[in-house]
Image (cartoon, rainbow, N blue to C red):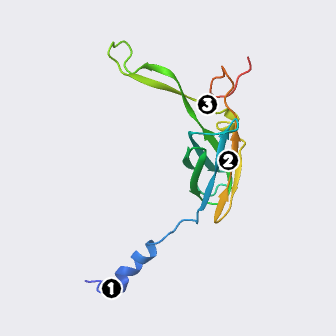
Amino acid sequence: MRHPHLDCLACLLIPLAIGCGNSGPEEAVVTGLVQIDGQPIDKGSIQMLPTDGVGSAVSSEIQEGRYRLKIVPGKKRVEIHLGEKKGQIPARPGEADSPMIDIIEEAVAPEFNIDSKLEANVVLPATEANFETKRLPPGARPRRPGSTPRAH
């Protein structure tokens, strides 16, 4: 037996219309300047993570100190990263003709990324959030996520 509404065009189109459109929360545009020791970060990344449980983490490239991203409004924890070349190692150790690969390490101090206390309060329709960071002290090794600092 055929369903009585099977021939009804509206019955076929209404479910499609309900599923269309922007179903997520409205996003704000966030822009700003990111500096390290008073100078714009040439090329790095910025990540905003919700502290209020609303929305998800969003990241963006930093180029010539500037960034732009779209994120659900609310309070955000901010992490800033800058990778710098610290040398090279062979891609295939022990092979004489091995190509070399760069060793890239975090240059921003942990209090601006892995241990960040930086915050942004993002509001609609747009927010400007500028950040000043500091370079990792000479001789200091960057920490890995999940590691804890140890006293020496």
134 in relation to 70, above or below: above
* Disc 3 residue crowd, few under 14, some 14–19, many 20+, Cα 10 Å: many
Name the element at disc 3. Answer: loop
Q: Is residue 93 left or right of residue 26?
A: left
Q: CA distance from mark 3 to mark 1?
A: 61 Å
Q: Amino acid at mark 3?
A: Ala
Name the element at disc 1. Answer: helix
- Residue 16: where, in percent of width, then height? 39, 75
The residue indicated by pointer 1 is 9
Visible residue check, residue 57 = no
Q: Amino acid at mark 1?
A: Leu
* Disc 2 residue crowd, few under 14, some 14–19, many 20+, Cα 10 Å: some
Q: Residue at x 57, y 39 (%)?
A: 42
The residue indicated by pointer 2 is 77
Instruction: Report which quarter residue 1 is drawn in.
Output: bottom left
126 in relation to 144, above or below: below
Quadrant location of the C terminus in the rendered image: top right
Task: First in sequence, mark 2 or 3: give its number.
Answer: 2
Q: Residue at x 68, y 52 (%)?
A: 129
Q: CA distance from mark 1 to mark 2?
A: 49 Å
Instruction: Report which quarter residue 112 is drawn in.
Output: top right
Q: Nearer the viewer, mark 1 or mark 2?
A: 2
Visible residue check, residue 31 = yes
Viewer-side residue, 31 vs 64 = 64
Q: Residue at x 69, y 45 (%)?
A: 131
- Residue 48: where, in percent of width, then height? 62, 49
Task: First in sequence, mark 1 or 2: give its number.
Answer: 1
Residue 107: which disc? 3
Q: Residue at x 71, y 44 (%)?
A: 118
